[in-house]
Image (cartoon, rainbow, N blue to C red):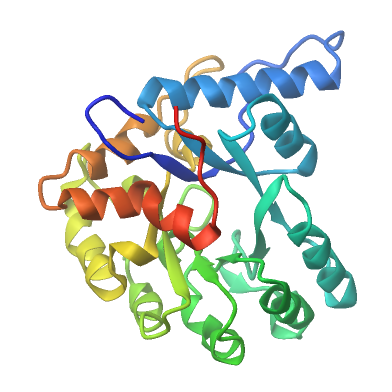
């Protein structure tokens, strides 16, 4: 845990990082994976993050969990539909490297609901996850309100809405009002099995750190769901994409900034910070890093 805190800080979403310049072709794939594990571990150590959920392909998840068991755990993004999706969910539930699954219910490039969702291709996956107890992260990109029928059909399903339920650049199209679909998320607060990944807030700001203009909207989310249903995530590789740099330097938004805007905020009390920065994740996903 970070010096000065008495609680674990857990990042609820990192992707696989990579060096800014490609490695020589002589470097084998296994070594490249291990290097990318160390890049992630070093980034976490540099800002004081104790553990992280790895949202990536299974080979990278395996490399992270194998090298640093207890610091990393995986979230598998499912691409299958129908019965194949149900079987993938059931397999994931029995995989010790994984703690949850993820479904891309929208196309992040357009923010439109995916045909797999609208045509029922994900229905078997939702049912299977509810039956076996696998929490699901749902990537909605502004379409959180469309999740209501799924949430109502599956009260036993643990749902975590990604990215504050809104679309975020640079991967999604820019919006005149970045918060215009927040009400769709807030309308889901009445369902106790719905949680929110507090992720990407710096990208919703028109200001520099500490991104003060985001706080009126973040306070609405905190008031609606409560800290005990929120989990912080950096998504730091995407934050780095927010401002293009040179071939070896890309400042973008810093990993530390997305953490410190919460950790050092005077409006949140210690109990709220402990919940948002790791406590909610540990309880909801039933996973904790070992004490160090």
Find residue 153 and report its horizontal and vertical position in percent. Answer: 61, 91
Residue 254 visible (yes or no): no
In which quadrant of the rendered image does the C terminus lie? Answer: top left
Residue 2 lies in quadrant: top left
Find residue 133 and report its horizontal and vertical position in percent. Answer: 66, 71
In the displayed structure, does residue 240 sit left or right of residue 92?
A: left
In which quadrant of the rendered image does the N terminus lie? Answer: top left
* 206 vs 159, nearest the viewer: 159
In the displayed structure, does residue 291 sit left or right of residue 140?
A: left
- Indicate whether 284 appears above or below 17: below
At x 33% / y 64%, what residue is drawn? 228
- Indicate whether 27 appears above or below 234: above
At x 85% / y 12%, what residue is drawn? 25
Find residue 41 and report its horizontal and vertical position in percent. Answer: 54, 24
In the displayed structure, does residue 192 sit left or right of residue 127?
A: left
Residue 201 visible (yes or no): yes
- Indicate whether 125 appears above or below 289: below
- Indicate whether 68 appears above or below 205: above
* 245 vs 81, nearest the viewer: 81
């Amino acid at each position: 845990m970070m010096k000065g805190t008495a609680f674990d800080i857990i990042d609820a979403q990192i992707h696989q990082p990579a060096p800014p310049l490609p490695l020589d072709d002589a470097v084998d794939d296994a070594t490249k994976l291990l290097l990318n594990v160390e890049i992630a571990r070093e980034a976490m150590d540099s800002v004081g993050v104790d553990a992280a959920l790895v949202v990536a392909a299974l080979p990278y998840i395996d490399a992270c969990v194998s090298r640093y068991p207890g610091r990393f755990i995986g979230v598998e993004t499912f691409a299958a539909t129908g019965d194949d999706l149900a079987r993938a969910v059931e397999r994931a539930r029995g995989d010790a490297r994984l703690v949850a699954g993820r479904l891309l219910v929208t196309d992040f490039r357009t923010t439109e609901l995916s045909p797999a969702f609208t045509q029922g291709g994900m229905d078997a996956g939702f049912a299977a996850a509810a039956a076996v107890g696998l929490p699901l992260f749902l990537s909605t990109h502004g379409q959180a309100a469309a999740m209501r029928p799924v949430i109502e059909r599956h009260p036993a399903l643990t749902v975590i809405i990604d990215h504050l339920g809104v679309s975020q650049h640079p991967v999604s199209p820019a919006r005149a009002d970045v918060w215009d679909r927040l009400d769709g998320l807030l309308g889901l607060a009445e369902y106790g099995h719905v949680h929110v990944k507090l992720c990407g807030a710096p990208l919703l700001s028109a200001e520099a750190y500490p991104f003060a203009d985001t706080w009126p909207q973040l306070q609405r989310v905190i008031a609606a769901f409560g800290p005990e249903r929120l989990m912080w995530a950096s998504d730091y590789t995407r934050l780095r994409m927010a401002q293009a740099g040179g071939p070896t330097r890309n400042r973008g938004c810093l990993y530390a900034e997305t953490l410190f805007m919460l950790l050092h905020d005077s409006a949140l009390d210690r109990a709220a910070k402990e919940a948002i920065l790791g406590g909610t994740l540990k309880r909801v996903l039933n996973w904790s890093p070992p004490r160090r």
